[in-house]
Amino acid sequence: MTTAPASLAPQSRETARLKQHYRMFVDGRFTEGGGEPVSTINPATEERLAEVSTASAADVTTAVRAARRAYEKVWSRMPGAERAKYLFRIARLVQERARELAVLESLDSGMPIRQTRDVGAPAAGAHFFYYAGWADKLDYAGYGADPRPLGVAGQIICSDAPLQRATEKIAPALACGNTVVLKPAYTTPLTALVLAEICQQADLPPGVVNVLPGVGDLGAALVAHDGLATVAFTGSAEVGRQVQRALAGTGRRRILSLTGPADTVIFDDAPLEPVVDGLITGVFAGPLAVGGWSRLLVQQPVAEQVLAALQVRAGALGIGDPLDDNTDVGPITSGGRLARIRELTSSAGAEGAQCWTSPVPLPDRGFFTAPTIFSGVSPAMRIARQEVFGPVLPVLTFRTPDEAVALVNNTPYGRSAAIWTQQPSRLRWTVQQVRKAVVWTNTVPLFDPTAPCGGYGESGLGREGGRAGLEAYLNG
């Protein structure tokens, strides 16, 4: 696939119904926050999208109190079947406004429209549909004879696929009878605020969902607030450790979904074409590419063949406007993240890795970086030990299955892995040996609201998705 011809019209940005000014959502109303307004930037053009009113520490207290009132007076007392009606209503509205949400997310985060429209927006609606089905069945979820909601849930999400991150946290909390105070990433707050608008449109009782855009220490102020009963956080392992320290000894529940290099392990009998398709989807041009499907471990006899096929495919990916259906690789979410990617790739070259970069030209403006593959990578290099969050793939080689497992496990992180081999016995053995929370076998990694996912080691605590995703929101 190549860069789209100029004659092809991209999705219209008018579909996003972009406003000039967005405000925080507290107690059922949009209102100005006490923090300094910030501008959200289109990463594809570096132009200002909108001004966003941000919350202050005092606004955190206001939002938590509103959520507590809604919890005590309305939401926790409501029968599960009634709560389910609200979640079903929100799910339908998300579906009705899916194209709007998809275009807005592409503008705000830089994700190509094929990902936001075909994966992100449908997944957002699916989470509400799925957890609506649990709302009146909690007695049968396996969390005790009389599971009860906890209270107010503080939730903080990152800038990767922000709409999906928001819904995978809000939906199970509401299904269990909790109320929510959500803080989106300061670089990508817009779809969370439109989701708040959808909650208002669905006549959700005031205070059940509150959304506080903010910068600086706002997330820390939310985590530290003594009015919370549980905290859910998605982001870096470094910030996750800070959250853990803040919650230590408080008795509050927490669920942490953190980063860390993920691995694709390719044995010498793996089918080449599906493997390359999976890597292209996971690293460069699919919904997982936002978070960085970080490392490739390939058995030495097929390493050159896999690298050659990857370079051909990655070198043909279209780079450009995320609103164009022909774009495979959009911009990096922010200038700060782009600077970090460049610093990591520079360090890889300085440490002796061999670099291949796509020859497709980059746009003149925007936070773009070309698909890049590093070969000759050793486990000690930074590029092999830190998640890049961009279209960059470090490649390591191994000789035996034991060596492959040692490479996968030689990290404090343990989020996920994909194993490719046509030998069932080797596949089963490898899956049993690797210390990863989620392992895919002979398939492109995909997520579903019915399936739990999470982290192992420094990649997280607890699970989101499926029945397991209810645990952080129930006292049972």
Image (cartoon, rainbow, N blue to C red):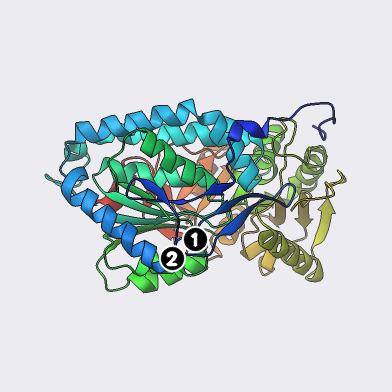
Mark number displayed over residue 266 = none
Which structural element holds mark 2?
loop
Q: Residue at x 84, y 26 (%)?
A: 7
Q: Residue at x 57, y 44 (%)?
A: 419
Q: Residue at x 62, y 51 (%)?
A: 292
Single out the mark in the foreground, 1 or 2. 2
Closer to the N terminus: mark 1 or mark 2? Answer: 2
Give yes or no for contact between labels 1 and 2 (Cβ–Cβ under 8 Å).
Answer: yes
- For label 2, the residue is 56
Residue 17 sits in which quadrant?
top right
User: Which amino acid is tagged 2?
Assistant: Ser
- Residue 469 pos. (x, y %): 34, 46
Q: Residue at x 74, y 67 (%)?
A: 343
Residue 266 visible, this orientation = no
- Local crowd at mark 2 within 10 Å, few (<14), some, or many (≥20)? many
- Local crowd at mark 1 within 10 Å, few (<14), some, or many (≥20)? many
In three-dimensional space, the C-alpha distance between marks 1 and 2, rounded to whole angstroms, equals 7 Å
- For label 1, the residue is 214
Report whether 285 appears left or right of 116: right
Picture layout, residue 57 above or below residue 165: below
Which structural element holds mark 1?
loop
Front one among 262 and 7: 7
The quadrant in which the N terminus is found is top right
User: Which amino acid is tagged 1?
Assistant: Gly
Front one among 444 and 297: 444
Residue 78 visible, this orientation = yes
Residue 128 sits in which quadrant?
top left
- Residue 273 pos. (x, y %): 71, 33
Picture layout, residue 437 above or below residue 114: below
Front one among 78 and 292: 78
